Image (cartoon, helix red, strand yellow):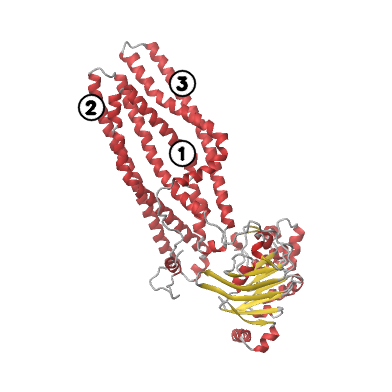
Amino acid sequence: MNQSEREQRTGTQGNGKQADAQPRFVYQDDEMLEKSFDWGQFKRLAVYVKPYSKQFIPVVVVMMIVGAITKLTIPLIISTTIDEALVIGGDAQFLFTMVAIMLGVYMIQWLANKHRIRYTSMIGQRVIFDLRHDLFRHIQRLSFEFFDKRPAGSVLVRVTNYVNSLQDLFTNGVVNMMIDCVQLIGIIIILLTINFKLGTAIIITVPLMFVVSSQLRKRVRRSWQTVNIKQSRLNAHLNECIQGIRVTQAYTQEKENIEFFEQMNGDNKQAWNRASRLNQSFGPIIEITGAIGYFILFWYGASLFQSGEITIGLLFAFASYIGNFWEPINRLVQMYSQLLVAMASAERIFEFMDEQPTVREKEDAADMPPIKGEVHFEDIIFEYEPGRRALHRINLDAGPGQSIALVGHTGSGKSTIINLLCRFYDPTEGRVRIDGIDIRDVKLHSLRSQIGIVMQDTFIFSGTIRDNIRFGKLEATDEEVEQAAKAVHAHDFIINLPFGYDTEVQERGNALSMGQRQLISFARALLADPRILILDEATASIDTETELRIQEALKTLLKGRTSFMVAHRLSTIRGADKIIVLDHGRIMESGDHDDLMRQQGIYYGLIQAQYKFLQDVG
């Protein structure tokens, strides 16, 4: 995302000031992919078919060939029947024989198509399952930086809508395209064999059609790309509106939200209508070309019939084959449009699949040994984007079992330090060491599994209270879950819920209070038994009485663990072994509470300001 796009997305100008003329919501997560139709995407999709090729492809190919041959045979059977049983002599026995043969051919064709559809559907569903699985798995591995730049709806639409748009391609599209190609080749051979002059006269109209239709292809491809972009932005905005519905209603912005959604929905409709109109332009081209073919047949074919070069039965066969000839061409054109839609989706899917985590394990990364808790930040410089420095030469030490408090104004770099410790990001310069080991040299899972973190914005998953606490340690017993809840004083409110620990909570735990969600998050982190515990504004939404109980519990639970606490409520960190005062990414002061109060510097000013605020509120 370049600078101009960031400015449009955030509504800011290069000097950091709010742009006056920017719309309220703008999504720049998707760009038009300016490249021609890429058959390389087809090869990447074919990789997902390969595991099932030996199991299903032979059956599908045989059924496809049988179906095509039987369909090509039927007009010849009818032509022979007309000439031999109706026009010449009227042999009833021969007529019944030919009708029986034709019925048998139809039955074979039906059975072949039935089994082909069955197996292609099985292949298609398995391919879609594998593709969606790989996409979701890859997204789980991506770094925070990836999600910082994209709204959740943009990610969601790729895993659902875009993958679904490939379903028809795999279940029917590719096989039907092969069938139509075989049928076209067969018809051309038969027409030229029956009567070379008439066949050539009719087939010569095909290049005319492709010359005209080729002019539409690029426009159709770009139009479907535009549709995908509009749908992605619509999903992103919808997801944001649902997540922020409380803020919307609190500030009575429903009307503005509806108006903007209608605008985006209208843009999506217009993009779809334009793509659909272009797509439907292929139909009239084929119909006109087909009409020219029929005109040639009846004009030139009639003269050949009158001269005795062809029979009435062969004329009928030509008419049947012409109908069958334009039918697969029409389907192939439609298939090409479907292919454009599918490839536009594939481009978006593989765009994500090609994204690589900015935080990656080294090939020789080892497991992190059991952490003792010694932490060193050495000359850390960190930039979220080039030129946007968040930390300036940070040096910070924490001994095993020490509690470190990080304080400072919003944007001072507190959460950035926490993110670097968990290796959600890598420093631009410098290194973070735990127990003397550079955390970039160890496997991510072995590092993060020994660090527990409780955020201010607690995330509660759909499921039971017990499952949410057990998320910190999936193999934990029910007794261990309850012990963790008791330790953070969550047990009392949990057992008063309708089904206790088995109470189902809604998405994000909306049925629970903010304080209750925080307590569950505490229990989850403590159940994991981390060697390093991070509390990022973790008590901001808990009432004073509950906070006092938690502070008592934490004295025991944090014993022997290194802890990092980020808090605006300064009363919660008075007992910390070391308090780090940050300002604009720099460490300004360091020491315990008493030392910093004696210095009467920034920390002293923060304490006085908060004390005065509490007095004014009181």
Question: Amino acid type of disc 2?
Answer: Trp
Quadrant of the rendered structure where residue 419 is? Answer: bottom right
Q: Which residue is mark 3?
A: 104
Count neighbours of disc 1 (C-alpha within 10 A) and say few if under 14, some if 14 to 19, many if 20 or more. Answer: some
What is the spatial separation of the Cα atoms under label 1 and label 2, in whole angstroms? 37 Å
Residue at (77%, 59%) from the top-left corner?
479
Q: Nearer the viewer, residue 293 or 370?
A: 370
What is the spatial separation of the Cα atoms under label 1 and label 3, in whole angstroms? 28 Å
Instruction: Tell me the number on the disc at residue 247.
Output: none
What is the spatial separation of the Cα atoms under label 2 and label 3, in whole angstroms? 35 Å
Q: Kindly tell me whether residue 568 is visible in this rendering.
A: no
Q: Nearer the viewer, mark 1 or mark 3?
A: 1
- Lower position in the chain sequence, tag 1 or tag 2: 1
Q: Nearer the viewer, residue 426 or 497?
A: 426
Q: Which residue is mark 1?
A: 174
Contact between labelled residues 3 and 2, with CB atoms less than 8 Å apart: no
Contact between labelled residues 3 and 1, with CB atoms less than 8 Å apart: no
Q: Nearer the viewer, residue 280 or 251?
A: 280
Q: Which residue is mark 2?
A: 299
Q: How many marks?
A: 3
- Lower position in the chain sequence, tag 1 or tag 3: 3
Count neighbours of disc 3 (C-alpha within 10 A) and say few if under 14, some if 14 to 19, many if 20 or more. Answer: few
| SS state under label 3 | helix
Quadrant of the rendered structure where residue 507 is? Answer: bottom right
Residue at (38%, 51%) from the top-left corner?
222
Residue at (34%, 30%) from the top-left corner?
323
Q: Position of residue 101 (x, y in %)?
A: 43, 18
Question: Amino acid type of disc 1?
Answer: Val
| SS state under label 1 | helix
Q: Is residue 49 left or right of residue 483?
A: left
| SS state under label 2 | helix
Q: Kindly tell me whether residue 141 is visible in this rendering.
A: yes
